[in-house]
Image (tube, rainbow, N blue to C red):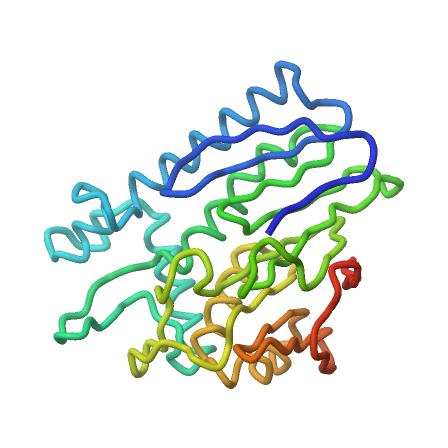
Amino acid sequence: MTATGLLPRPTRYVDHVMGMPISLALRGRHTHDHRALEAWSEVMADLREVDRVFSTYREDSFVSRLGRGEITVADCPPEVVEVLGLGHRARLESDGAFDVRRRGPDGPVTLDPSGVVKGWAVERASAWLHALPETDFCLSAGGDMVCHTDDPASPPWRVGIEDPADPGRLVATVPVRQGAVATSGSAHRGAHIVDARTGAVPGRVASVTVVADSLTWADIDATAAYALDREAAAWLRSRRRTAIVVWADGSVELTDGTAPRQASRLRSSDSLSHR
């Protein structure tokens, strides 16, 4: 996903952590002054600390050590308890399709809270940007983003939703003033999401995008809905989520939080209203 604003042109920052690009767009009073640079530095420091604690690719992370049984939850920072609690809630609310514990093809269960961590971490880090007065921001991590406009007269951020069959095209554009957008699918990272109950890779759904107030839950729900495969849209409607489900046959289903509508293909000029 990408986000742009109308005039004035935003100031942009880019860095990498947690194995993905982190980008920030700022408009308004603080865009490239000391306060803006300090806030961006704090955002990245927060995300690097999250990587130190939660990365499943680092042998020395708390999550890796916890998964190997070398330490207990009591030995971990309190953030680990918070993330595992979110994962437990998500497992219950998705009837087990979403789980932070994965069963491999040969049987062993591994701890992988990545489906919770990204949205939770970026939403938490965005607090540094909320502290910038008279400043709009859009903070993106691997395409999932938190958007904020400080002035009601400011134009919304416009978030483009990629076509999973052709990432160079958009299936929709979502204007966001206050909120978050998250997409789950296999277009960029391959078949990394499975139904935790069966280990099956989704085959009917191509991508799920959720628009919500919280990036934590937008990300969790997009991942859970994708794992639910053919049940994705129905489950999102049951949660009253605004979402865009792109099916493997190229059709697009929208849920507005109360009722769905069908479309064979949305044009890049089409949009969804949010807040």
Which x, y percent locates residue 160? 67, 53
Residue lying farthest right? 153
Point out residue 161 in the picture as x, y percentages from the top left corner: 64, 58
Measuring from the top left, give residue 224's x and y in whole percent. 46, 72
In the displayed orientation, state which residue is furthest to the top.
Answer: 34
The residue closer to the viewer here, 8 or 32, is: 8
Q: Is residue 111 left or right of residue 224?
A: left
The image quarter in which residue 169 lies: bottom right
Q: Residue at x 77, y 38 (%)?
A: 150
Question: Which residue corresponds to the image point at 14% horizontal and 75% vertical from the top-left?
Answer: 107
Q: Quadrant of residue 133?
A: top right
Give the residue drawn at x 68%, y 28%: 132
Q: Nearer the viewer, residue 71 or 149?
A: 149
Residue 201 lies in quadrant: bottom left
Residue 179 location (% of width, % of height): 67, 53
If the image is split into quadrants, where does the C terminus sit? bottom right
Is residue 105 shown above or below 230? above
In front here: 124 or 73? 124
**Picture residue at 48% right of the left edge, 82% below the top:** 204
